Each structure stands twice: as structure tokens, then as C-alpha cells.
Image: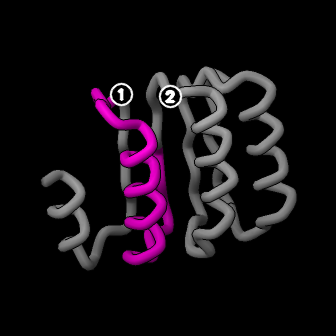
Amino acid sequence: YYFAYLFTQKKLRFLSLIDNQIDDETEFLQNVIQLCKSLKIPGLDISGNFDKTLFSYFIDAISTVPTIKRLGIRKSKSDEEGLHSFMLLLQNHPEIQEVLCDGF
């Protein structure tokens, strides 16, 4: 129901998903990407104890959201794999103007 409600918010400009309790990480992160794409959300903050490889794929998928201008990632615990994906994202997408990183 959470994402069903969010998809109805047509003027959403910033999505902050901090420390959510998640049963299905894959579905959650897929929904975040779909939401950002369909609503053309320019700002995203996300944190959580996600699987390292899965979160690295999520960072890669953010590159398919051309409207993201601000990106915050906290407590991802994705180590070098996630940091590498994040660095590639920033190199390949200069439209990202504001970045917050804490806890790779």
C-alpha cells in the first residue's frame, strides 16, 4: 500500500526513505526506481541495511532515472562494490548536482 499511495502523488519532488523495515529488498528497490522514473522525482535520499550486491545494482539502476539531481545514500554498507558503482554513476551523469554519502 505504501508505494501505491506514493504513485498517486503527482507533485512529489523529493523522496526520503530512511531506515525502513523491509521484508523484500528487491521489490522495494525496484519500486523506488519505478517511482522515481514515473514521477520524475529530482531528489532521493535512501538508507538501510541492504544486501551489498543488490544495492550496487540499485545504484546502477539510478542511472536510468534522468531526472535525479540530488542523491543521498546513507548506511548502505555496500563496501567497495557499491562505492565503485556510485563513482561510475557520478562520472556518467553530470546532471546530478548534489550528493550526500555516508557509510559505504
Q: Is residue 37 magenta?
A: yes
Quadrant hosting residue 64: bottom right
Q: Amino acid at mark 2?
A: Phe
Query: How far from the left and from the top, in percent, is residue 59?
Result: 64, 48
Residue at 71% x, 70% y is 95
Judging by the rendered image, the residue that carries numbered circle 1 is 19
Label number found at residue 81:
none
Q: Is residue 77 magenta?
A: no
**Mark toward the start of the polypeptide (2 vs 1):** 1
The residue to which callout 2 is attached is: 50
The percent coordinates of residue 12 (x first, y second) are: 31, 69
Quarter holding residue 90: bottom right
Q: Is residue 77 found left or right of 89 in the rendered image?
A: left
Q: Amino acid at mark 1?
A: Asp
How many residues crowd around disc 1 within 10 Å: few (fewer than 14), some, or many (20 or more)? few
| Residue 29, x across and y down, in percent | 45, 48
Magenta region = 20-45
The C terminus sits in image quarter: top right
In the image, residue 58 lies at what x, y percent? 59, 48
Q: Badge 2, how many Cα within 10 Å: few under 14, some, many 20+?
A: some
Element assignment for label 2? loop
